[in-house]
Amino acid sequence: MGMRALHRLLLGLRHHSRGAALVEFAIAAPVMLSLYLMAFIVSDAISANRKVTVATRALTDVTSRFISVNGSDVTNVLGAADKVLAPYSSGSNRASLRISQVQVTSATQAKVIWSCESGPGSPLAANALVTLPTGMVTTTMIPNASATPPITGAYIIMGEVTYNYTPIFAYNGAGTMTFADRIFLVPRVSTSIPLTGTC
């Protein structure tokens, strides 16, 4: 093929536009698919994080309404809170849920009275110290032996949920993300919620 024939062929191709849409689609499709998958992963991660907060609130709120609890009560409450996480917490990818009662020892700390856990985590040891959020404890909640009558430290229910979220699609190296929340509530009906037996 001579140079003139090649030149005429190239000029002819310049006026053909039937394949342009296909070429444009081939270029745009991977970008659009990537954006869609990224939006799906972000949306699903936000939903999972929100579920963790809702489950933590439910776990702590329900427990704070008891006068006292036994092992069966705690197991039921932990199980119900785990259901709140559905469909995220299932199979081997389970969340760790923990409910504890702590007693205030100072403006920034409390000691563990009892602790129960469901999932791959572990309960807190009795008398272990827990750091409290700044500004949460009022003066009347801090123990004072010299007061008349003496003031004992206030009791607080502490709910914790930790969940390792793994995206369905690994986008741009996105791996497992850990979502966790911790909520403190004072007992609603009594000053303390003792645990009878074990959990």
Image (cartoon, rainbow, N blue to C red):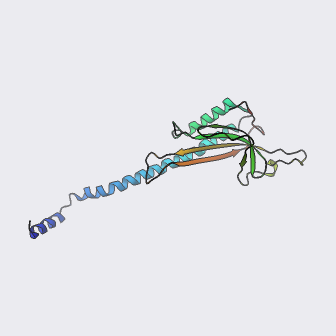
Percent of width and height locating residue 125: 71, 40
- Residue at image position (15%, 67%) is 11
- Residue at image position (75%, 42%) is 127
Q: Is residue 197 above or below residue 6?
A: above
Q: Is residue 34 left or right of residue 123?
A: left
- The mark tally for this picture is 0
Query: Looking at the image, which is closer to me, 168 or 66?
Result: 168
Res. 35 image quadrant: bottom left
Q: Is residue 178 left or right of residue 75?
A: left
Quarter occupied by the C terminus: top right
Percent of width and height locating residue 32: 37, 54
Percent of width and height locating residue 6: 12, 67
Percent of width and height locating residue 1: 8, 65
- Residue at image position (17%, 63%) is 13
Q: Is residue 33 left or right of residue 3?
A: right
Query: Looking at the image, which is closer to me, 67 or 120?
Result: 120
Q: Is residue 141 above or below residue 27?
A: above
Q: Is residue 31 above or below residue 8?
A: above
